[in-house]
Image: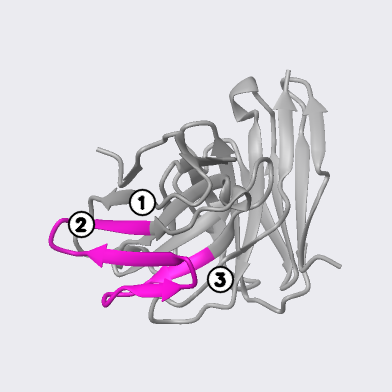
Amino acid sequence: RKEVEQDPGPFNVPEGATVAFNCTYSNSASQSFFWYRQDCRKEPKLLMSVYSSGNEDGRFTAQLNRASQYISLLIRDSKLSDSATYLCAVIPMEYGNKLVFGAGTILRVKS
Amino acid sequence: DADVTQTPRNRITKTGKRIMLECSQTKGHDRMYWYRQDPGLGLRLIYYSFDVKDINKGEISDGYSVSRQAQAKFSLSLESAIPNQTALYFCATSRGLAGGTDTQYFGPGTRLTVL
């Protein structure tokens, strides 16, 4: 089983839709969680960290479910510019500050 | 100017050739990383360095070596390139904060093709 797994998609949604992605992790001792955004052929950029209590940044909401070992990203009112690949990343407890990335979920927002 | 730069941005080489990818940063970060990205596999850690005298193997270090010449520079070498090393390579840096708040900042990537 992969350490971090994501549905590769693509998720094709119309503008204005709400879309959610999940990311599961295998190491129950994982301590830190992140969502990165990657545009085609570009570098990943941090979208948001995921806190235990959940957190929101504008149209984006991240949640952590430790019992079921997954994190989620909810995007409300999707924009064309949200089209990208969304990577989740996890720091397992024994890894120090080294990230383990999922393979990414492709989102395509269409007009 | 970009905070994390990589050279070259694109490279085509032949099997058996030695190639070096370079990464420079102006962020003043102590920690630097090399990843490769392959379709469907996500980003995988090759090597990382937490300061100038520190080099550590990542998940997939075989066939690669690194050099941390200075705080700002971290080079990745392929001693004898092979076709399955064709990938997109990213350098990243981080400040080294504790508590899971250590954000990594990525360079623009080097697209390497080994024929």
- Which is closer to the viewer, label 1 or label 3? 1
Query: What is the image's colouring?
Result: one colour
Q: Residue at x 52, y 43 (%)?
A: B61
Q: Mark 3 belongs to which amino acid? A: Phe
Where residue A104 sits in the image (x, y, percent)?
46, 43
Marks 1 and 2 sit apart, C-alpha to C-alpha, by: 16 Å
Q: Which residue is mark 2?
A: A69
Q: Nearer the viewer, residue A56 or A3?
A: A56
Q: Residue at x 76, y 46 (%)?
A: B21
Where residue A53 sits in the image (x, y, percent)?
27, 77
Q: Which residue is mark 3?
A: B50
Q: Quadrant of residue B23?
A: bottom right
Q: Quadrant of residue B38?
A: top right
- Depicted B107 relative to depicted A85: above or below: below
Where residue A1 sits in the image (x, y, percent)?
24, 38
- Which is closer to the viewer, label 1 or label 2? 1
Residue A64 included in the magenta stretch of the image: yes
Q: Is residue B103 visible?
A: yes
Subunit that carries the residue with mark 1? A
Q: Mark 1 belongs to which amino acid? A: Ala
Subunit that carries the residue with mark 2? A
Q: Which residue is mark 1?
A: A20
In this rendering, do the residues under marks 1 and 2 share a single chain? yes
Callout 1: few (<14), some (14-19), or many (20+) C-alpha neighbours within 10 Å? some
- Do residues under tags 1 and 3 come within 8 Å of each other at their CB atoms? no
Magenta stretch? A47-73
In this rendering, do the residues under marks 1 and 3 share a single chain? no
Where residue A54 sits in the image (x, y, percent)?
31, 73
Q: Closer to the N terminus: mark 1 or mark 2?
A: 1
Task: Indicate the quadrant containing the C terminus of chain A: top left, top right, bottom left or bottom right.
Answer: top right
